[in-house]
Image (cartoon, rainbow, N blue to C red):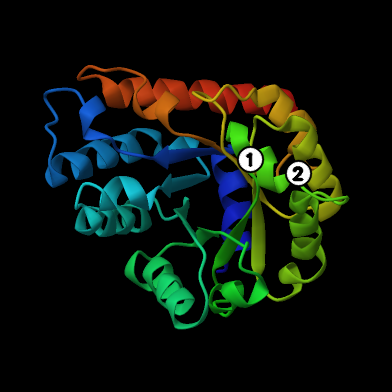
């Protein structure tokens, strides 16, 4: 089953638009968890198992693992998601962007090493940089479009037709005919989220920025959901992972996940 069918099944099965971002920072772990590679794996597995029935996706951010020399832990965590939570979509947040053989290696890393259903990519180098990802027709390619950081307007709003709109249009008219494509649009940019939805129709949109960055769940749904109330992968990382600094972190993470799920569901119904 390809990325889009898996995502639609996950939305329906979990009745949830929530994606938990796995950004493990050992400096924020409870003291009882520890700080090494095994601690990172334990922390993430506990979060995954506490929230797996209430989400449509998990999104590990590769930099948090690489910076802590924990890529092997990431491999095992991805395997754990696939084995124990097979109905949940696995998105590798890598934001890769390069050309030729290097792009091919990045695609192999995401899809073969980590077994991701989809990967985030940077389109600034043009369509040829996305070709190795497009070649994997059974996987998803989630393209950066309008990001949630304050400085994004410096590049993404440039031009008579803003760059983010050009990317959205290219995704809707060309890239989506060649691959299973989605877009990244930040929750902190609600008017741009609506504009992107108007351009891309029913393509899935990964929405970071809810929670610690201040994005509002009801606003995200109002501006970004499709007519049937789906179309969104609403990511929250820090607000869920670090909902408690104590030994009850997994219980608190579940509570925060359910609160976000219920807020989104109330808005879309």
Q: Which residue is mark 2?
A: 157
Using the rendered image of the protein, determine whether residue 227 is visible from the camera's viewpoint.
Answer: no
Identify the residue at image location x=11%, y=25%.
32
Left or right? Give the position of 36 relative to 127. left
Distance CA(mark 1)–CA(mark 2): 8 Å
Left or right? Give the position of 76 relative to 213. left
Left or right? Give the position of 161 relative to 16. right
Q: Is residue 176 above or below residue 239?
A: below
Element on which disc 2 rests: loop
Give the class, few, some or many, for how many residues have Cα within 10 Å of label 2's Cα (few <14, many ≥20).
Answer: some
Give the class, few, some or many, for how many residues have Cα within 10 Å of label 1's Cα (few <14, many ≥20).
Answer: some
**Label 1 vs 2, first from the N-terminus:** 1
Q: Is residue 23 above or below residue 132?
A: above
Q: Residue 85 or 23: which is nearer the viewer?
A: 23
Q: Is residue 206 above or below residue 176?
A: above
Identify the residue at image location x=74%, y=31%.
190
Element on which disc 1 rests: helix
Q: Position of residue 187 (x, y in %)?
A: 64, 32
Q: Position of residue 67 (x, y in %)?
A: 26, 48
Q: Position of residue 87 (x, y in %)?
A: 47, 53
Identify the residue at image location x=65%, y=29%.
188
- Quadrant in which the N terminus is drawn: bottom right
Q: Position of residue 140 (x, y in %)?
A: 57, 64
Q: Which residue is mark 1?
A: 152
Q: Residue 144 or 60: which is nearer the viewer?
A: 144
Identify the residue at image location x=61%, y=36%.
151
Q: Are marks 1 and 2 in contact (CB under 8 Å)?
A: yes
């Amino acid at each position: 089953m390809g990325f889009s069918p898996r995502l639609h099944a996950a939305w329906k099965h979990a009745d949830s638009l929530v994606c938990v971002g796995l950004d493990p920072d050992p400096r924020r772990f409870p003291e009882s968890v520890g700080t090494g590679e095994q601690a990172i794996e334990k922390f993430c597995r506990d979060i995954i198992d506490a929230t797996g029935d209430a989400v449509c996706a998990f999104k590990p951010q590769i930099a948090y693992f690489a910076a802590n020399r924990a890529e092997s832990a990431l491999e095992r965590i991805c395997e754990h998601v696939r084995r124990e939570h097979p109905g949940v979509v696995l998105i590798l947040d890598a934001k890769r962007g390069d050309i030729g053989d290097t792009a091919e290696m990045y695609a192999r890393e995401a899809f073969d090493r980590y077994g991701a259903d989809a990967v985030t990519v940077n389109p600034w180098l043009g369509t040829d940089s996305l070709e190795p990802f497009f070649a994997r027709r059974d996987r998803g390619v989630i393209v950066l479009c309008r990001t949630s950081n304050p400085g994004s307007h410096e590049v993404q709003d440039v031009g008579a037709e803003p760059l983010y709109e050009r990317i959205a249009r290219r995704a809707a008219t060309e890239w989506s005919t060649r691959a299973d494509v989605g877009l990244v649009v930040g929750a902190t940019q609600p008017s741009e989220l609506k504009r992107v939805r108007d351009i891309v129709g029913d393509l899935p949109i990964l929405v970071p920025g809810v929670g610690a960055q201040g994005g509002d769940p009801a606003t995200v749904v109002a501006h970004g959901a499709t007519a049937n109330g789906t179309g969104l992968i609403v990511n929250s990382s820090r607000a869920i992972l670090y909902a408690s600094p104590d030994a009850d972190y997994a219980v608190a993470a579940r509570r925060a996940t359910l609160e976000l799920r219920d807020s989104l569901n109330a808005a879309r119904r």
